[in-house]
Image: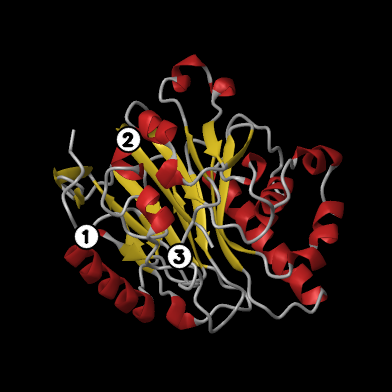
Amino acid sequence: MCRFLLYKGKQPILLAHLITRPKHSIVNQSFDSRLRIDQVRPLNGDGFGVGWYDSETSHHGQDEVTPCIFTSVTPAWNNVNLVRLAEKIRSPLIFAHVRASTSGSVSESNCHPWSYGRLMWMHNGGIAQFDKIKRKLQNSLSEELFLFVQGNTDSEWAFALFLSFLSNPKANTFEHQELKEAMLKTIAQLNSWAEESDITEPSLLNFAVTDGESVVCVRYTNSKTDEAASLYFSSGTKFECYRPGHYRMVKADKREHIVVVASEPLTFEKADWLTIPTNNILVITPKLNVLLQPIKDKFYTPERGLEHKLGEDEAVIIPDPKAQLFKAKVEEQMRQEASTTTVCM
């Protein structure tokens, strides 16, 4: 089980404001994860990765838009280069991931995120009994996508499967609808192979993908009763530090200038974060509209999401009661333990 976060904003943000400075930053989550399903092993120390898009590339033509990615097998809490980079790099779209290995060895080739052309992908969770369906997945791929995979994780093979559902994975532009449909097809195919292989153990499929313009992520498990791995989102006009180590999402008007999705909330402000319900898909459009909808497959249950409007489009924001209660308890504990060692800049 891993932890990840992603940021999309109208303006670039310093990586440190997400990755290192908040009291419950993604780096802190690497050694102090509070919302993991498997709380017996709360460390995410099997490597990390950060991916971002250069905000200047749009001025040089779309064919040059590819993500920058920095990965390492060292724990995120013990990598001085990550801290140095986070204090210098700004980007309007960021992926960050801390890894707890459930499949594959500890190596840089197995660290998230991965990229293909302008696309970037990461995963929190695991494909249950992946060895039973791995050959089927590999046989479904083109030669190019089969050879693209360099590591040995279920997550990277899932990325290759996702790419196979795109009409042209090397395209210079993608519509967010195409990315969404490819994501749904990826989940449906994994479910189909699991059923064919008599796998009854649920998979945890919190996937995220971006082309540098749109973002698609999903909180999903192939079970009608189990909860998927935790996932939250926050949106507003500004993500600000109001005292050392403490951040909040400012909502100056109804328009969204910033969207953050994270396995665990980065702030102590209860009103900042909404739970993404289990078995829902979230889309962030290039114009920062947030679309949140239930995945209505055989594992769909009505209580996991009802249609609701957010911004200009249909959305779903129905929190899972158990997850919200758990989150509230963790927030209270975090506030009690909070210290002031980080400096706002």
Q: Earlier in the sequence, mark 3 or mark 1?
A: 3
Q: Amino acid at mark 2?
A: Lys
* Image: 112 above or below 155: above
Check disc 1 and report the residue beneath it.
268
Mark seen at residue 42: 3
Question: How did the renderer colour the structure?
Answer: secondary structure
* Image: 211 above or below 3: above
Question: How far across and how far down the image is residue 80, in percent?
Answer: 40, 34
Q: Can see residue 143?
A: yes
Which element is circle 2 on? strand
Q: In the rendered image, which quarter is residue 132 located in?
A: bottom right
Q: Amino acid at mark 3?
A: Pro
Q: CA distance from mark 3 to mark 2?
A: 34 Å
Mark seen at residue 10: 2
Instruction: Answer with left or right where residue 333 lies relative to residue 172.
Output: left
Question: How far across and how far down the image is residue 301, in percent?
Answer: 52, 81
Quarter of the rendering occupied by the N terminus: bottom right
Q: Nearer the viewer, mark 3 or mark 2?
A: 3
Are the residues at dot 3 and dot 1 in contact (C-beta closer than 8 Å)?
no
Q: In the rendered image, which quarter is residue 124 located in?
A: bottom right
Mark seen at residue 139: none
Question: How far across and how far down the image is residue 180, in percent?
Answer: 57, 53
Q: CA distance from mark 3 to mark 1?
A: 20 Å
Which element is circle 1 on? loop
* Image: 332 above or below 78: below
Instruction: Answer with left or right where residue 265 lies relative to residue 333.
Output: right
